[in-house]
Image (spheres, helix red, strand yellow):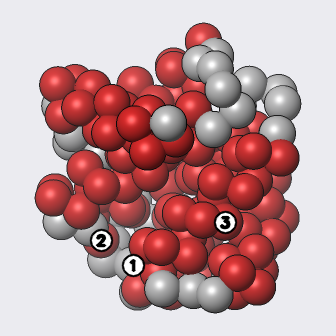
Amino acid sequence: MRKLFQWLAAPEPMQLPQDEARVALAVLMVRLARSDGDYALAEIARIDRVLAAVFGLDAPGAAALRTEAEMLEREAPDTVRFTRAIKAAVRLEDRIGLVEALWSVALADGGRDAEEDRLMRLVVSLLGVTDPESGLARQRAARLLG
């Protein structure tokens, strides 16, 4: 996945190949889940479910992608570069769906943390998603978590 870091280090956002975009999204989810200092089992399980649903993976495939993302997240460049790369690779309508998926990870442990909220505000803005769209995505995610 060193290629992912090369694309992210480019001066201008580049179109990511599908596999690299998938890893970038997984890394962003892991980063969000870790942002409050408590990488909860509920968040890990939610990441696996989201990856399986979004990318059509079976449970072992989703867990393998998440495990790879956990390793990469530690050495990944800043969130801004990841988000720009995702924005360049994903249509607006799909980015709103990604925001909903990210909210489902942030809410999976049963609460909202100030650090997760801060990171979500940054990511939402960088993805070109509006605050009202993010609010609706958060509400949908909360309903799904029930």
The image position of residue 115, as x and y in percent, is 63, 18
Against 62, residue 87 (above or below) is above
Contact, mark 1 vs mark 2 (Cβ under 8 Å): yes
Against 131, residue 52 (above or below) is below
Res 6 seen here: no
What number of labels is visible? 3
Res 20 seen here: yes
Packing grade of label 3 (10 A; few <14, some 14-19, many >=20) is many
Packing grade of label 1 (10 A; few <14, some 14-19, many >=20) is many
Residue beneath disc 1 = 16
What residue appears at the point 76 percent right and 75 percent down from the top-left corner?
A: 63
Horizontally, is 101 left or right of 49 in the view?
left
Horizontally, is 60 left or right of 116 in the view?
right
The image position of residue 103, as x and y in percent, is 46, 38
Q: Earlier in the sequence, mark 1 or mark 2?
A: 1
Instruction: Please name which of the two marks, 3 or 1, marks the residue nearer to the observer.
Output: 3
Q: Which element is circle 2 on?
A: helix
Residue type marked 3? Asp
Q: Quadrant of residue 109?
A: top right
The image position of residue 88, as x and y in percent, is 27, 64
**What residue occupies the far top of the structure in this picture?**
114
Residue type marked 2? Ala
Contact, mark 3 vs mark 1 (Cβ under 8 Å): no
Could you tell me how far apart the alpha carbons at marks 3 and 1 are, in whole angstroms? 22 Å
Residue beneath disc 2 = 89
Q: Which element is circle 3 on?
A: helix
Against 9, residue 79 (above or below) is above
What residue appears at the point 44 percent right and 33 percent down from the top-left corner?
A: 142
Horizontally, is 81 left or right of 112 in the view?
left
Assign the N terminus to one quadrant of the image: bottom right
Residue beneath disc 3 = 48
